[in-house]
Image: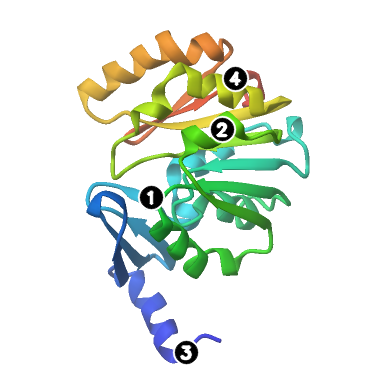
Amino acid sequence: MKTLMDWFKKYWSYISPVHLESIQGLENQTLSVYLSNGRYQLTTENAIYSYDDLYDNFSLAFEKLDWKQLPEKSHVLVLGLGLGSIPYMLEKKFKKKFSYTAIEFDESVIFLASKYTIPRMKSSIQIICRDAASHVMEDEDEYDIICIDVFLDDVIPDSISEIKFLLNIKCLLSPDGIVIFNRLNRERDEKNHIQKYIDQVFSSVFPDYGSIQVEGNCMLFSDKSKLANT
């Protein structure tokens, strides 16, 4: 039950972000939760990990999908949970009745997601505390949608950029499924790096790939035919 203070914080968050708490995560990074524009936001020093339905990277990516080509009750693999924006927005904004398996290596992130986001959802969510690259080597399930959003602050671990990681991902993907991969694309060096990554790695595993540019990021899709209006 919301208190008067809760309502005030939500109202004030449309004027200025309201700090709710901060805890230590992996590599001594500070994980901070804010209420901003009425939404829960998880940040580190240099990155936004989650922002409810305003997490634009994936919100815009989901808007590009031709949902008619995907199962109505898809099984979704989320690599990198954050505060839970991906399952939250699929349920609340896109009205999808999906089930989720979320892989998150940082116990502090899982704690915060379980406190602020998971209780607001009805979807089935299994959360596993494990390194994403190790998990996909041994996972035997099949997924219709695989969302890759793995960062340590604003850095993507090397293990997530290797071709063997994508090959393992491909083995977990259903025949008509899709992979959505969030990559950095801010500075000139990063723009050159992402194009090299696409040419030498991503396209070698997913030759029919598609992509969209989001401010500061590039969203990669394993199959452009599953995007609307392409």
The mark closer to the camera, 3 or 1, is 1
> Whole-percent x and y of residue 146?
59, 35
Q: Secondary structure at mark 1?
A: strand
The residue nearer to you, when weighing 88 against 24, is 24
In the depicted structure, whether residue 201 falls above or below residue 39: above
Residue type at numbered disc 1: Tyr
Q: Which residue is mark 1?
A: 49
The quadrant of the rendering that contains the C terminus is top right
Choose top left, top right, bottom left or bottom right for residue 183: top left
At horizontal 28% and vertical 53% (from top left) the residue drawn is 44
Q: Which residue is mark 4?
A: 224
Q: Is tag 3's residue or tag 1's residue first in the polypeptide sequence?
A: 3
Q: Is tag 3's residue or tag 4's residue first in the polypeptide sequence?
A: 3
Q: Which residue is mark 2?
A: 136
In the depicted structure, whether residue 173 falls above or below residue 8: above
Q: Which residue is mark 3?
A: 3
Would residue 9 be found to the left or right of residue 29 on screen?
right
Task: Check contact, mark 4 vs mark 1: CB within 8 A.
Answer: no
Task: Check contact, mark 4 vs mark 2: CB within 8 A.
Answer: no
Q: Is tag 4's residue or tag 1's residue first in the polypeptide sequence?
A: 1
| Dot 1 crowding, Cα within 10 Å, few <14, some 14–19, many 20+ | many
Q: Which mark is residue 230?
A: none
Q: CA distance from mark 2 to mark 3?
A: 42 Å
At horizontal 45% and vertical 53% (from top left) the residue drawn is 54
Q: CA distance from mark 3 to mark 4?
A: 47 Å
Residue type at numbered disc 2: Val
